[in-house]
Every structure is written in structure tokens, then in C-alpha cells.
Image (tube, rainbow, N blue to C red):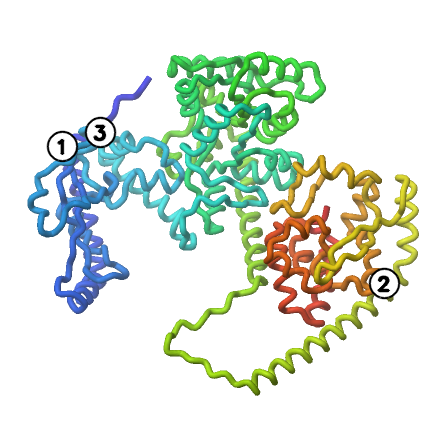
Amino acid sequence: MTKPQMRPTSTTALAIRIVDLLAASVMIAITSPLFICGLLRSAIVNINAFESVFVYGANHRIISLYQFSYSGTFKTLPVLVNLLKGDISLLGKKMEFAFDVTESNSQLFGQSQKTQVGQDPEVVSIKPGLSSIEQINSATGLSFEASQRSLLKAHSSLFNYLSALVRGLFVTILTRSFMPKIKHSNAPVSVFGITLDNWTMSDLLNDIKQVCQTSSSKLQQYSFVNADCLNISCNNEAYRSSLKQSKRIFADGIGVRLACLSKGHPLRDNLNGTDIFPRLCELAAEQQLSLFLLGGEEGVAAATAENMLQQYSNLKIAGVHNGYFDMSSDSEENNQVVAQINQSNADILLVAMGAPRQESWLEDNKPQLNCSVGIGVGGLFDFYSNRIKRAPSWLRQIGMEWTYRLLQEPSRMWQRYIVGNPIFIYRVWRENRQLKKVKTTLPQAAKAKTNIDYTPRFNAKQANTRRAIHNLRRQLNRACKRLLDVTVSAILLTALLPLFIIISLFIRIESKGAVLFCQTRAGRNNQPFTMWKFRSMYQDAEQRLAAMQTNNEMQGGVLFKMKRDPRITLIGKFIRKASIDELPQLWNVLKGDMSLVGPRPALVSEVKQYSQHDRNRLLVKPGITCIWQVTGRSNIPFEQQVELDIDYIYQQSVTADLWLLIKTIPAVLFARGAY
């Protein structure tokens, strides 16, 4: 049942006006020195110290907002005079500019009204504000929520008005004051290696609609992740793999929003199953799509379906089933549930089992399901079956819904929020710190001279001298590098011979075939050479690679990396983790095909996919280790690997090689990013 909207009274309007008047007086008094400086600056720069910007006020009357005529800081400070006069409020409607009005015709428009269709008259009578409900909702990702009701409630009493102002101030401090200046974009954001799609609610609904209307035999999985989910993904590789197999992943909660803000990438909307559900039901009713509800305790999904059918009469619920059954992929119960879903011919499957179970179940049963869309929705059935009450809108507005959940179920939620939130913050800080370190190693573009009067003088003699010195240094560096390669590789090959024999025996005992694995790789200037490694995979690994390309976990698509690669043997997992499988490449170093330090040798098939920029990493001999091997190894995307390799090429020296060799030791011992 819809609650009646609260309307502002004349007494409330008077109280709000007094608050605005007092606030304007205090702010003008505090900023008076800045006001005087701005006035003097405007008077010096322009004839008129002030200029006007026209907006639609209460009842669509045209009002003129004052601002200084110069361009710069505190230009809009005179708007406090409008607040003092009563043209605007501290909190009101979002300002809408009247572009057709100018200084010359403003008097003609003073009494005119702008026609609005479908807008509440009470909302029309509210003044525009320095802040608005839309701004507060946008900051916390709730821009899809209707703001009119919240605005009317804020103006229904002085307490609600002051509460809304406090919420707006809290959100502003939380999302802006402690974050860097950022530019809004629609680009995806990566947190802990999980790529989050930066979409609005309408973008998501349109995508689901398009997928359902496109005939496809493969189920498309959508996932929502909050801070707790991302914490789980750091320790649960199966869950992490399930997320990466999803078509789209969306951020849910203030924690993930702040994490993305700290990376300089603000998220557009806060997307989760609970918020999308009523809008998805409305879309399904309009487009004649059917839903299947899977999850929750016995009767919860059915109660949810009944409640939604009362709101959307044209909605089709194809079926419901509780979430308490044997979820093993080969169990009879699981097969019966899958068969029930398929027989219902549902277009959209909502799975409410909580993370990570729901994502894992969707991934395991995806090949057998004939639904178009599968979405993990957490505990939304509990909310829409009225089993658990959701946090009030004002608490959601400030991103503190999690505190309400903690108060509801402290024994179940304390570990997720009291322990999990600080861990999440630490992990975000650590990741940002690591990324900052990586960025500092990337080459910085030199700033070009832009002065048109600048004419450089060319000294041919000086240029030739510098070129000769540079070439001499390059030759000496190559000679020293080669001497270092021969010396170190010869010593290590001799010292590690017993280890080579032991590893060879283990490899031969576990699986038939050659102990060493040879492969043609691209060397310097793309010249092919034979690279040697200890065999860590089964004999038919190359034949099975083509069928596994869709499971590639390396961003960029050029390299193939997979943490749980089924082609790897047991001894292979160990020698890969410890990087022992690469030791036979010391022979390649001794021969001169490779160097101790340099970009990793690429497959010939990989080089064919290189862009012109990527081919710069072929300018030097490939190596056993380099910059990205000691900073993140397989966790670093291919594009960033290329940048780090090119950075090494332009800054290489014997000293740098020695330092990288030293840093390789802890990287190997702790197996950072190795798989």
C-alpha cells in the first residue's frame, strides 16, 4: 500500500525560510573577506561587477542568480544573496536554467510560467536549492530513484528539512572532500582484478531486454558484487572464476563506490538485485517475459512472486523453488531443479542463494539451462516477501544500508561488516599503492615546447659527438650485459645440475614423454629460436589449447593464462609455482638466444596479434625476468606488460639488470602472480 505523500504547510515553509535566512547571514558574514576581494576583482576586470544567470524558480517564475563577472574561484559566491532574499533554498529542486532569457528581456519573462506535464503542483511550488535530492542520490548511485517524494518529505517539517541537509553534507564530505578531483566516464573499473561495468539502471535493463529478445542458446550470467563479495574473491578462486565468466559484473554498496572513487573512476549507479527487481518485473510485464525465482527458504520465493503479481498484473512468474537442495551438479535433486526451470520456459532466472553459492551454481549449470538470462540476486526474496524489512530510504541515501542490516542480524552480519569492511579498505589501499608504484615505472612523456618564438639552434658537431658517446655507451652496455649473462648462466647451470636430475626423474615418473619441452619463440627482431623448459603439462597440451581459448583469464586476449589449467601435471604445478620450469632457459642464455633480463619470449602466434606498438618489445633479446615479472607477473594485463617491457628497453643498464635479478629472488620465493 502506497503511503500518502506529506505536504509542506505554511508554518513549515516559514520555519524553513528562517533557517535559510540564518544560514545565508552566517555564510555571508564568514565569507565577507572573499566577497570583497571578488567584488574588487570584478570591478577591475569588467565594467559590471556582477552578472546574472537565469533559472526557473518556484512556480516556474524566472529568477536571476547573481555571480561575479570574472572567471575563477568564488565566482558563484554572490548566490548567497539570492539565498538571503529567498529566491532559492539550501535544499530544493534541481536548478533548471532558462536559456531563452537574457538581461534585456528578463522583465518580460518575470511572470511567465513554463509548462510542465505530469509534475506535482506541490513540487512546482518548492524553490530551487543550492543542493537537491537528485544530487544526493547521484552521489550514492541512486539517481534512478524518484526524487519528488523525498523532496516533499524533506519540506514537510523542519526536522525532515534539517535531516536532509545533514544527509547532503555527509554525502558531500564522504564522496568529495577526501577524494581526488575526477572526471566522469563510462569506462569499466577494476577492483582486485574484477572488472566492474560502469552502467546506469536503464543501461542494465535495456541490455537484459536485448539479450532476452535475441535468440541464443547460451545463458548470459549477470553478477552484483559488494565489499564482502570482493573480499571473498580474494580467497576463493572458484568464486573469482565464476565472476569472470559472467557477462556483466556490477558494483553494489558504498564501499565499492568509494573504492572506485579512490582510483579516480566514479561509478554512475549503485546496481543490485534488490533495486533492479521491481523495475525488472515492470520490464518483464511490458515485454511479456517470464521470471523463475530460485532460492530462499521454503515458501519465501512463492510469497515474493505473489506480492509482485499484485503490483504487476501482467507479470508472468514461470515458477519458483526454494534454495535448499543438493546443489552437486550430478545430484538427482539438482537435475530435477534444472529440469523444472527448463520446462517452465522462463526467460530470466533469478538465483537468491547468496555469494558465492549463487554464482557458482549458475556457472556449473549454465550449459544445461535454457533461460536467456541468469542473475545472482542475493537476499532480495527476503525483502520482497516481507520476511525482512529493508533499510529506510534516508539511510540508503547516505550509503549506510549496511548498518541497518547489521542491527537486524548482528550475530550473522558482524563478521561481514565489523571485520570485513576494514579488511576491504586495507586491500583497496594496498592495491592503489601497488598500482601507483607500477605507474611510476612507466615512461613519462616529455613536455613539448609550445612557444612559437622559440627556434632551436642545431650544432652538427655537438650532435655528432653526443651520438658517438651514446653509441659507445650502448656497445659497452651490451658487452657487459653479455659477460654477465655468460658468467651467471654458466655458474647456475653447473650448480643446479643435481636439481635438474631430480626434477627430470619426477617428471618422467608422473607422465610419459620427454622431460624437456622445446618451443619456437620470437627472439630479437622477431628471429625465431628454440626455447627450452621443463615439461609441466601433459603431452597433448598443445592440441587441447584451441578448445580452451574461451577460458583465457589474461586481459588483452594475446597471452593465454589460466589459474586452474587442466593440462598441467602435479609436478608441473609445483615447478611452475616455484619457477623451476624456466631454469633450462639458462642454456638459451649461454648460447646467446636469450638474456637473463629482458622481455619474456613470445610465441610466434602471439606476435602475429601484436600491434605496431607491441612489436617494440622485440627490439632486444628476450629474457628470463624483467620489470613486470617482479611487480605482478600474470596478474598484470598484457597492455601494461608491454609498457613495462618498453620502459626497460629504453632504460636498460647492467646496474638495472643486477637490481632486477635481486628483486626476482623474493618474487620467485613468494610466488607472486605465478600459476
Badge 1 element: helix
x and y percent of residue 530 in the render? 81, 55
526 lies left or right of 384: right
Label 2 to label 3: alpha-carbon separation: 79 Å
x%, y% of residue 566? 76, 36
Residue 665 visible? no
- Foreground residue among 545 and 31: 545
Residue in the image at 66% along x and 40% along y: 552
- Residue 322 higher or lower than 440, as above or below: above
State the SS at label 3: loop
Residue of label 3: 119
Dot 2: what SS?
A: helix
- How far across and down, in percent of the image, does residue 609 sit? 64, 49
Crowding near the residue tagged with mark 2, few <14, some 14–19, many ≥20 C-alpha atoms within 10 Å: few
In the image, what residue type sits under mark 2? Leu
**Between 53 and 448, the one nearer to me in the picture:** 448
CA separation, marks 2 and 1? 88 Å
Of callouts 2 and 1, the N-terminal one = 1
Mark 3: amino acid:
Gln
Residue under numbered circle 2: 492
Q: Residue visible at 84% across and 56% down?
A: 584
**Quadrant of the image occupied by residue 497:** bottom right
Amino acid tagged 1: Ser
Q: Which mark is residue 10?
A: 1
Left or right: residue 79 versus residue 496 is left
Q: Is residue 321 visible?
A: yes
Mark 3, residues whose alpha carbon is within 10 Å: few (<14), some, or many (≥20)?
few
Upstream in the sequence, badge 1 or badge 3? 1
Q: Position of residue 240 (x, y in %)?
A: 62, 37
Quarter of image, res 159: top left
Q: Nearer the viewer, residue 231 or 645?
A: 645
